[in-house]
Image: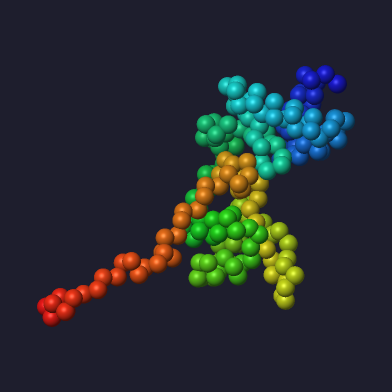
Amino acid sequence: MKTEKINSAIEAILFANGASVEPSRIAEALEITADEAETYLEELRQEYENADRGITIVKLGNSYQMVSVKEYAPAVRTVMDMRRNTPLSQAALEVLAVIAYNQPVTKTFVEQIRGVDCSGVIGSLTAKDLIEEKGRLELPGRPLIYGTTENFLRCFNISSIEELPPLPEDNSKEDKSDDTVEMTDEETDE
């Protein structure tokens, strides 16, 4: 198959699927190697990125998806009569950060970090498809473990968790003995 035909076939697959597709599945469908599929996908992604189009191709972890360009979101929402999602609460952002930076984690781990019950927030984040159950720990009670989803990557416009900004240094653990000041006898008498 010629390169133009392969690119067209990849476009058709991405468009028709609607969700993300792994290069290995495209390779299987087009009878090419996974490495070749990845190369074609990257070239096509670059082509879309450099063109002034209303759609683009994004990489989400190990897969690719065709999506609309952000700048046209208001027009798309109007036509599709979609309500803008409500922003995440501070609690939801905190829980999401704990999960994103430490995944996979249990609800108990998140609650230990935050110091409050997180059941409702975890349920809300799961309903918004920002986190998902990733399995169970082999411990008594077999607690669920959670991690982020492809939708999380899409919403935060990153390709993988490794692109998250680094956490700030925690300076509160430094030795505070340098901050203590001894008072002289004169100062204590005042």
Count of numbered circles on the image: 0
User: Which quadrant of the figure has residue 7?
Assistant: top right
The single residue placed furthest to the left in the displayed view is 190
The single residue placed furthest to the right in the displayed view is 31
Rendered-image quadrant of the N terminus: top right
Q: Position of residue 142 (x, y in %)?
A: 73, 71
Q: Position of residue 2 (x, y in %)?
A: 83, 19
From this viewpoint, is residue 79 visible?
A: no
Compare residues 176 and 25 and report the one nearer the observer. 176
Q: Position of residue 72 (x, y in %)?
A: 54, 31
Task: Tell me how the rendering is colored.
Answer: rainbow
Could you tell me which residue is drawn at 63 percent across and 44 percent down? 160
State left or right for residue 16 relative to residue 172. Answer: right
Could you tell me which residue is drawn at 63 percent across and 30 percent down? 56
Rendered-image quadrant of the C terminus: bottom left
State left or right for residue 158 relative to residue 139. Answer: left
User: Which quadrant of the figure has residue 97?
Assistant: bottom right
Could you tell me which residue is drawn at 63 percent across and 41 percent down? 159
Is the residue 179 above or below the residue 100 in the image? Answer: below
Q: Position of residue 94 (x, y in %)?
A: 50, 58
Is the residue 187 above or below the residue 74 in the image? Answer: below
Could you tell me which residue is drawn at 58 percent across and 22 percent down? 52
User: Which quadrant of the figure has residue 183?
Assistant: bottom left
From this viewpoint, is residue 161 visible?
A: yes
